[in-house]
Image (spheres, rainbow, N blue to C red):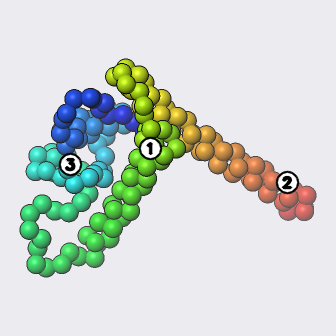
């Protein structure tokens, strides 16, 4: 599900939003996330130390010079999985721009722009919920159909 963590028309550094987003996640779920998939801008010393103090793994390359010895297979596998999952996040941004109109906002006033953005996010979430409901009903129908075939055949 998509969520708006910060919506501002003033210039700000995105990396400062990470801490509040993590704390909001903890308030919603009762625990901190196991990992955070971020862009390079979020990988600064302050955010990395914040996440490591809470036991949260943050995706991306390490800061500083790369080590001479290669990463272990396990580390490479984790980095690959993080990168793969991060692609899914970027797909959501692309979907929001192409299918739900976030790339075509033509509003001039701040309040109508905010409303357009919020409505696009709501539409994305409704679309996802409808798809999940459809999959659920397909599973239920398949189970009922399979059960009827078993009963008709005498099993």
**Which residue is found at the position 85% from the left and 54% from the top?**
148
Q: Does the image show residue 49?
A: no
Residue 97's disc is 1
Number of numbered discs present? Answer: 3
Question: Which callout, 3 or 2, points at the residue further toward the start of the chain?
Answer: 3
How far is disc 1 from disc 2 in space, using C-alphas? 44 Å
Dots 1, 2 in contact, CB < 8 A: no
Q: Nearer the viewer, residue 61 or 113?
A: 113
How far is disc 3 from disc 2 in space, using C-alphas? 54 Å
Question: Which callout, 1 or 2, points at the residue further toward the start of the chain?
Answer: 1
Measured as percent of width and height from the top left, residue 76 is found at 28, 72
The kind of secondary structure element at disc 2 is: helix
- Indicate left or right for 140 with 147 as reference: left
- Vertical relation: 105 (above or below) 37: above
Residue labelled with disc 2: 148
- Residue 149 picture quarter: bottom right
Residue labelled with disc 3: 42
Q: Nearer the viewer, residue 28 or 18?
A: 18
Q: Nearer the viewer, residue 155 or 83?
A: 83
Query: Which quadrant holds the C terminus?
Result: bottom right
The kind of secondary structure element at disc 3 is: helix
- Indicate left or right for 141 with 106 as reference: right
The kind of secondary structure element at disc 1 is: helix
**Which residue is found at the position 76% from the left and 49% from the top?**
141
Dots 3, 2 in contact, CB < 8 A: no
Mark 2 Cα shell of 10 Å, populated few (<14), some (14-19), many (≥20): few
């Amino acid at each position: 599900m998509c969520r708006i963590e910060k919506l501002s028309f003033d210039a700000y550094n995105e990396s400062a939003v990470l801490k509040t987003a993590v704390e909001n996640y903890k308030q919603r779920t009762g625990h901190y996330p196991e990992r955070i998939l971020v862009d390079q801008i979020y990988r600064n010393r302050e955010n990395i130390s914040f996440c490591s103090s809470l036991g949260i793994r943050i995706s991306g390359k390490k800061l500083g010079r790369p080590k001479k010895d290669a990463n272990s297979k396990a580390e490479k596998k984790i980095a690959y999985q993080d990168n793969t999952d991060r692609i899914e996040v970027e797909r959501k941004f692309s979907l929001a721009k192409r299918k739900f109109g976030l790339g075509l906002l033509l509003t001039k006033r701040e309040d109508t722009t905010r409303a357009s953005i919020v409505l696009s996010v709501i539409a994305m979430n409704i679309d996802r919920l409808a798809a999940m409901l459809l999959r659920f009903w397909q599973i239920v129908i398949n189970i009922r159909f399979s059960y009827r075939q078993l009963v008709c055949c005498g099993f």
